[in-house]
Image: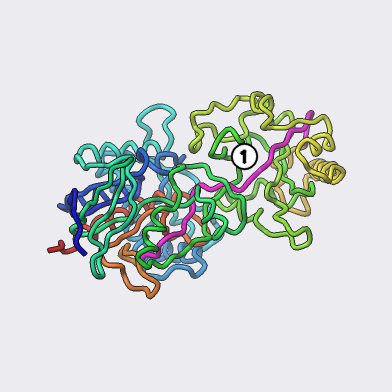
Amino acid sequence: MTNAWDEEADVVVLGCGGAGAVAAITAYDSGAKVIVVEKGEFGGNTRLATMAFLCPANNSSAREHIKALSFGRLGDDIIDAYVEWTSKNVDYIKQLGGEVETCFPGASFSLLPGSETMLRYRVKAGTEGELGGESLWNLLSENLQQRNIPVHRHTTATRIIRSDDEVVGVATQKEEQRFNIRARKAVVLATGGFEYNEELKREFLPAYPIFAYGNAGNTGDGIRLAQELGADLWHMNAVAAPMGYKFPEFQSAFIMRMPAHGYIIVDQNGNRFCNETGLEHYSMWMSVTSFDTESLRFARIPSYLIFDERTRLTGPITRVGHGANRAYRWSADNSEEVRRGWIQSGNSPSQLASKLGIKATEQLTETLNSYQKACRIGSDEKFGRSKETLVGFDGKHYGVPLWPCLLNTQGGPKRNARGEIVDVSGKPIKRLYGVGEMGSIWGFLYQSGGNLAECLGLGRMVGLNAAAELPLS
């Protein structure tokens, strides 16, 4: 195939979030000329992340733990590569000029073997109130600028160009201008997940609707680009998804973070269905995506968060500054959100149920009475909530619909242990690499900090391998 090339580089990186930035920096430091293409501004989900990156111990116990998390969906070679590279993340941050601090707790699933090896850190904040993802992104952005790596912003990759059986470049478009970039060595796909692609979510995720917290540019573009070249897919139903609130004024959701224990979660029938304070943060979606075969619906989507006056006054029912909506200033006592109608209130459970649209008003009353009894006796026999979290309701009742909401999806083009994207026969698509949440290694249970770790660790691996490809003649 003959193409007219408007620009050339050794390595072309598609996507300028954490994974793309690290791949670009590493390829550049390995002697490659690099061009980055980003359809939005930059930063992706990395910039909007809240806390930590994983830096596991480099030993057999860490490998055993990640294997247990994957439930058989990862080969040993992939696990070995992940642990080998991510175990050096703290050293890498220091090489970039950053400082780190420890984040506790470490393991998301402490009962699985090897959990003690899951060590989490964050980049120290440069300014007061700066969150972990911002600190990390600012460090990566500074390093991109120091190297003068060109980033084509607001530019969309429309096609990956292949000659015979190998990738040779990328077709791109910025507004009405189209141009082709030749990749003498490799193309790296780091375009993020599909949190804002409704078609892909309906097709692959375990339930619907599922909203999202992060970068609205994550619409699965890289998946389509790779599929056009025959790429296989993996982990398409894997997600990191806490519960949250979705309001029509905002495209993105607000994460649920309760300031006190005076709350319960009920389904559309007004029934509790879980130990509300015992849910693992990133796997909350697993508690609500079961399909009710009697009513023929997802009876827990939405669920409803029910809390009392004392909890309302304690603090915001969200993590202020989280995700894409961080510019919105949630009121300290939730009063503004009550005024807006986001949070409904009632003087009785039945009144609140009616306002929320829960038809089983009597059942919500019975559920709350049962919960109050459990608080009095200090024992939640049905769901096992701990005694110290059994805090009875006091005063007015409040409620808000609760939805599964994506921090990110994990699925995308399948990769081998070198980060090469493979086709449906398992063969590498020559000179095409993938990194980040677009085809992440996380295929079932997700370890907190695992995606940022992948950006840092496997981003370096992919950048190095891409730069080491023999140049096209």
Please identify the quadrant where the N terminus is shown.
Answer: bottom left
Say which residue label 1 marks. 245
Q: Position of residue 339 (x, y in %)?
A: 68, 24
Colour mapping used in the image: rainbow
Whether residue 407 is in magenta: the answer is: yes
172 relative position to 129: left or right: left
Residue 205 in view, yes or no: yes
Dot 1 crowding, Cα within 10 Å, few <14, some 14–19, many 20+: many
Considering only vertical position in the picture, is 77 above or below 124? below
Q: Amino acid at mark 1?
A: Tyr
Q: Position of residue 460 (x, y in %)?
A: 28, 54
Please identify the quadrant where the C terminus is shown.
Answer: bottom left
Which residue range is magenta in the image?
Answer: 393-415
Q: Residue at x 25, y 40 (%)?
A: 143
Q: Position of residue 438 (x, y in %)?
A: 41, 55
Q: Residue at x 76, y 30 (%)?
A: 345
